[in-house]
Amino acid sequence: MADKNRSLFRRATHRVFRISERYFNQRRAYDYSPVATSVLKHPSPVLGDVMSGSMFDPCVVELPEGGLAMFVSRRDKGSIERWDSKDGIAWNYKSTALSPAVDASAWDSTVNRAGVLLSSSGWLMWYTGQNGGSSAIGFATSVDGLTFNRVVATPVIAPELEHEGGSAMNPCVMAEGNGYRMWYAAGEDYEPDVICEARSNDGVNWEKLVKPVLTKGNEPYDAHKVGGCSVLRLSELSLAMFYIGYQNLDVARICLALSDDNGLTWRRSSVNPLVGPERNAWDSHSVYKPSALLGRDGVVKLWYNARKNRNEYVGFATIKDIGCLI
């Protein structure tokens, strides 16, 4: 009974501490402008409402026949859904793309935070599986992009290295040559700490880089930690990484890092942060995981999830010319 009372006391103490911490953290939400000068933000969420509950961590893919498919996490169901759109703003539900494991004790009893590619052989999905306060990355495929099936029963990326802590999540995968490159977030399970990279020939067996490719920075906007990203190729050697920068545990913004040597080193954009909380708006508390597409005209389309209190929905922004961020 004494042990139970001590446990209840610790939980109650932690809850009081987090309420106080969140209150003081949230006061930093408006330290920066809600958008950089080159960014135009849609005024309201494009996906999610009180009926759906929180929708978060989108991954948007261009369809060969035109239009877009979004693979988005749905918190109340612990699943990944597909929604389609013609313009990136109005979205229509298509399917539950991946459901949680039937076994409640499985490593992926909750699934979310997917990275999806459409290849010549079909649809490929790397997803985050969660259970018991830890996260790992699994792999699933689909013929039609509507329903995905797990390729292997175990994670293809699990936290093993010291800097990965107890969590590997938010895969962003790029096809390169005859294989794949993955950038993923790792560290604490509540919010990750670093961005890492791994490479694979088959999408199942991955070789990790020994050190993270991006860690917390010197400026306040990402001085606490960094998280989930979306990487675009600009040229043969140039990459752009849109990522979550955390000023503290409860205030995050979308930031940009650039590489001129094919991802060996990264430098932060001088115009950071790009998108952040806006006072009295639906995204007034925090802005999270980006999904970016680059048009032939140089315009970047950016989808992201954002939070007011506990409600998370998906927003949309455009960057008129990525050149102005470099």
Image (cartoon, rainbow, N blue to C red):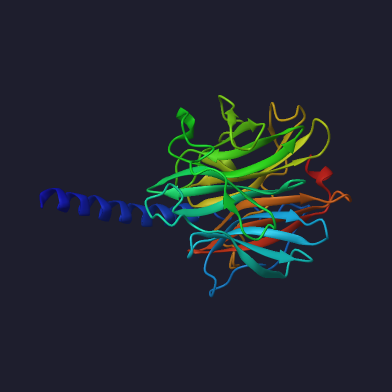
Quadrant containing the C terminus is: top right
Can see residue 148? yes
Q: What x and y, as percent, mark residue 163?
A: 48, 31
* Marker count (numbered): 0
Q: What x and y, as percent, mark residue 54?
A: 53, 65
Taking the spot 43% from the left edge, 57% from the top edge, the residue there is 102
Taking the spot 47% from the left edge, 40% from the top edge, the residue there is 167
Q: What x and y, as percent, mark residue 109?
A: 44, 53
Which of the 4 image quarters holds residue 318? bottom right
Which of the 4 image quarters holds residue 302? bottom right
Residue 181's place in the image compared with 94, above or below, is: above
Q: Is residue 136 left or right of residue 183?
A: left
Q: Is residue 97 left or right of residue 175?
A: left
Residue 217's place in the image compared with 85, above or below, is: above
Can see residue 44? no
Taking the spot 49% from the left edge, 37% from the top edge, the residue there is 158
Taking the spot 15% from the left edge, 53% from the top edge, the residue there is 5
Q: What x and y, as percent, mark residue 179?
A: 71, 33
- Name the residue at the left extreme: 1
- Name the residue at the top extreme: 210
- Name the residue at the bottom extreme: 51
